[in-house]
Amino acid sequence: MDWIIGAAGACLVAGAAYAKRSLSASGAIAALIMGTVYYGAGDLFWFGLLLLFFVTSSVLSKVKQAEKRQAEQMYEKSGRRDAVQVLANGGIGMLLCLANYIWPSPVWFGLFVGVMATVTADTWATEWGSLSRRPPRSIVTGKPLPAGTSGGVSLRGSLAAVVGAGMIGTAGAVLLLWMDNGPDWPLWAWIPAGAIAGTFGAFVDSYLGATVQVMYRCPSCGKSVESRTHCGTSTVRYRGWPLMNNDAVNLLSSAAGGALALAVMILAGRWFG
């Protein structure tokens, strides 16, 4: 029955997102599969955090779209999320959910909150940071960068990352309190675990974006972009590892955030449990 409920709920959410042009066809299919697994193999805790991330991120992506268009031109992908983007943001969480289904352990819960806090923090930072009136600065050199450049950070985006990550940690604590079937760790500790790990993961994402993420230059306008085409022509790679695109960076930063959240929860359990 849980798998049926999960499929029905995921179908409604994915269908609505497709209708609102938040997801492409492949993205909607990936979201349907993912949502089904999150609820069928997990429960409302897993599905709820995924849904919270997806809904808030979709809403923020629609805020002041006209002002974000210039920054979005530099991204590898923008607008409607495809299957690869959906899996890059929620794929690790789905594997953790399945792992807990097969080998139940508090470890999967701690990792999951960190992963979801990271992808939420990164998305919120991108959406709100792109609306900053001041140009972002390189996380490595501190020099001003054009809006939308990988590795750029801003005060507005950083604050959004902290709020988004803290929201996931808070929601995790509320869901576990309501369901009363989570790990035997202090409930309050989920809030700082989510906030700290998610913010850390978002900054890891920015650091990787500034150092190893593959970047291209448009021969027509001279802009530095993430995509292989720009201004209707093929771009030229000038830095970064060939396979280290934005989706790969998301996966690595999510893993880093998950590991830190687990460490915070284990320490909280030892010191205050």
Image (cartoon, helix red, strand yellow):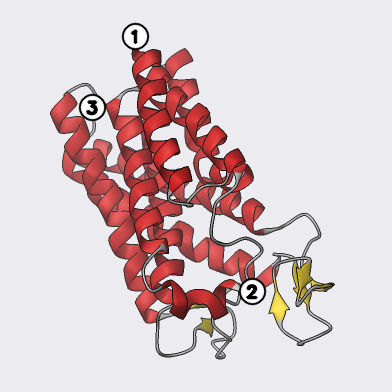
- Amino acid at pointer 3: Asp
Does residue 146 lie above or below 162 as drawn?
below
Point out the image quarter for the C terminus. top left
Question: Would you say 17 lies left or right of 223 here?
Answer: left
Residue under numbered circle 1: 1
Does residue 225 lie above or below 244 as drawn?
below
Q: Residues within 10 Å of mark 3 (few under 14, many from 20)?
A: few
* Farthest-out residue, top: 1
As drawn, the label of residue 184 is: 3
Mark 1 or mark 3: whose residue is earlier in sequence: 1
Picture quadrant of residue 159: bottom left
Residue under numbered circle 2: 74
Element carrying mark 2: loop
Q: Nearer the viewer, residue 1 or 253?
A: 1
- Residue, x 62% and y 60% (percent of image)? 77
Contact between labelled residues 3 and 2, with CB atoms less than 8 Å apart: no
Q: Position of residue 137 (x, y in %)?
A: 52, 85
The answer for how far apart the CA atoms under marks 1 and 3 are is 27 Å
Q: Nearer the viewer, residue 39 or 104?
A: 39
- Amino acid at pointer 1: Met
Question: Would you say 24 lies left or right of 219 here?
Answer: left
Mark 2 vs mark 3, foreground winner is 2
Mark 2 or mark 3: whose residue is earlier in sequence: 2
- Residue, x 84% and y 83% (percent of image)? 219
The answer for how far apart the CA atoms under marks 2 and 1 are is 44 Å
